[in-house]
Image (cartoon, rainbow, N blue to C red):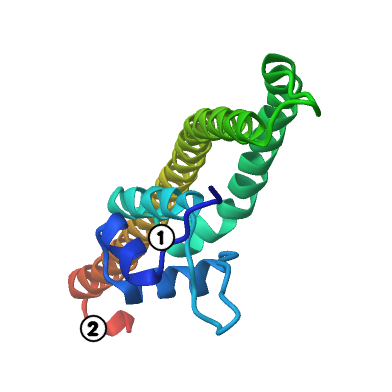
């Protein structure tokens, strides 16, 4: 029994979005979605899990352009986890099953089915672990972005406050200068009045 493939309508139903949303995400995030010989998209369980992850992150407020930055790393991590699990599983499975050439084809087929079952179990475990790695990576990424954004906003606010105080200081100094000039001009007028017009 090979890997199950889903057409776009079934994949969209499983992710609980419209088919055009999957196509849009595939295009915008440059996701590696396989196609049939006729050019139709088909989706694997891994693709559907990735779409669930994307949907959850979007619902939490993450933008596609932010997701686009982290998805290549997530896919690499997922591939590494998958590869490590398979490499660990092969010797154990072969040892347990002890497939021998002299066994009859029915027994060999049954044992191969069991091997495949074990592989699927390992794949499921690998995907679950990968999802935990994804959640942590995304959480760290989002936290870092939020901290940077808050820092930027605080710096911008401080700059605005500083500019406001500089303008206020400038206005106060202008007012003081005008008062001094006004007082000097007023004193000269009073002196002229007291001494009379002959001094002018």
Q: Is label 2 in a helix, a strand or a loop?
A: helix
Q: In the structure shown, which secondary structural element does the residue marked by tag 1 occupy?
A: loop
Query: Residue 100, image x and y in percent?
Result: 78, 24
Residue nearest the observer in this picture, 65 or 156: 65
**How far across and how far down the image is residue 145, in percent?**
48, 45
Q: Earlier in the sequence, mark 1 or mark 2?
A: 1
- Mark 1 and mark 2: Cα distance apart in space: 81 Å
Q: Which mark is residue 93?
A: none
Residue at coordinates 64% horizontally, 40% vertically from top-left?
77
Name the residue rendered at 59%, 45% in the picture: 74
Query: Considering only vertical position in the picture, is 119 above or below 167?
Result: above
Residue 109 placement, left or right of 47: right
Residue 195: quarter of image = bottom left
Where is residue 104 shown, x and y percent of the image?
A: 69, 30
Q: Could one spot residue 86 in this view of the protein?
A: yes
> Which of labels 1 and 2 is toward the front?
1
Give the camera-side residue of 123 and 158: 123
Percent of width and height locating residue 13: 26, 62
Compare residues 136 and 188 and report the one nearer the observer. Answer: 136
Q: For this view, does 79 lie left or right of residue 151?
A: right
- Viewer-side residue, 74 vs 83: 83
Q: Is residue 16 above or below residue 73?
A: below
Q: Which of the image's four quarters has the C terminus?
A: bottom left
For the point 41% across and 53% down, the residue is 54
Q: Is residue 64 left or right of residue 174?
A: right
For label 2, the residue is 197
Identify the residue shown where x is 53% and y is 47%: 1
Q: Which residue is mark 1?
A: 63
Alpha-carbon neighbours of circle 1 within 10 Å: few (<14), some, or many (≥20)? few
Would you say the residues marked 1 and 2 are in contact, meaning their CB atoms lie under 8 Å apart? no
> Where is 61 relative to 19, above or below?
above
Tell me, yes or no, if residue 184 can be seen here.
Answer: no
């Amino acid at each position: 029994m090979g890997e199950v493939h889903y057409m776009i309508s079934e994949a969209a139903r499983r992710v609980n979005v419209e088919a055009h949303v999957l196509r849009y995400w595939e295009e915008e995030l440059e996701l590696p979605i396989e196609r049939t010989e006729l050019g139709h998209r088909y989706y694997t369980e891994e693709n559907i899990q990735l779409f669930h992850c994307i949907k959850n992150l979007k619902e939490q407020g993450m933008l596609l352009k932010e997701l686009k930055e982290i998805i290549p790393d997530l896919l690499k991590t997922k591939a590494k986890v998958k590869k490590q699990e398979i490499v660990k599983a092969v010797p154990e499975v072969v040892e347990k099953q002890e497939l021998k050439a002299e066994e009859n084809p029915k027994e060999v087929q049954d044992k191969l089915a069991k091997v495949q079952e074990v592989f699927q179990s390992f794949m499921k475990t690998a995907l679950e672990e990968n999802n935990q790695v994804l959640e942590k990576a995304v959480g760290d990424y989002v936290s870092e972005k939020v901290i940077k954004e808050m820092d930027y906003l605080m710096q911008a606010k401080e700059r605005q406050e500083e500019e406001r105080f500089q303008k206020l200081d400038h206005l106060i100094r202008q007012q003081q200068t005008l008062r001094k000039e006004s007082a000097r001009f007023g004193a000269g007028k009073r002196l002229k009045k007291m001494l009379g017009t002959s001094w002018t």
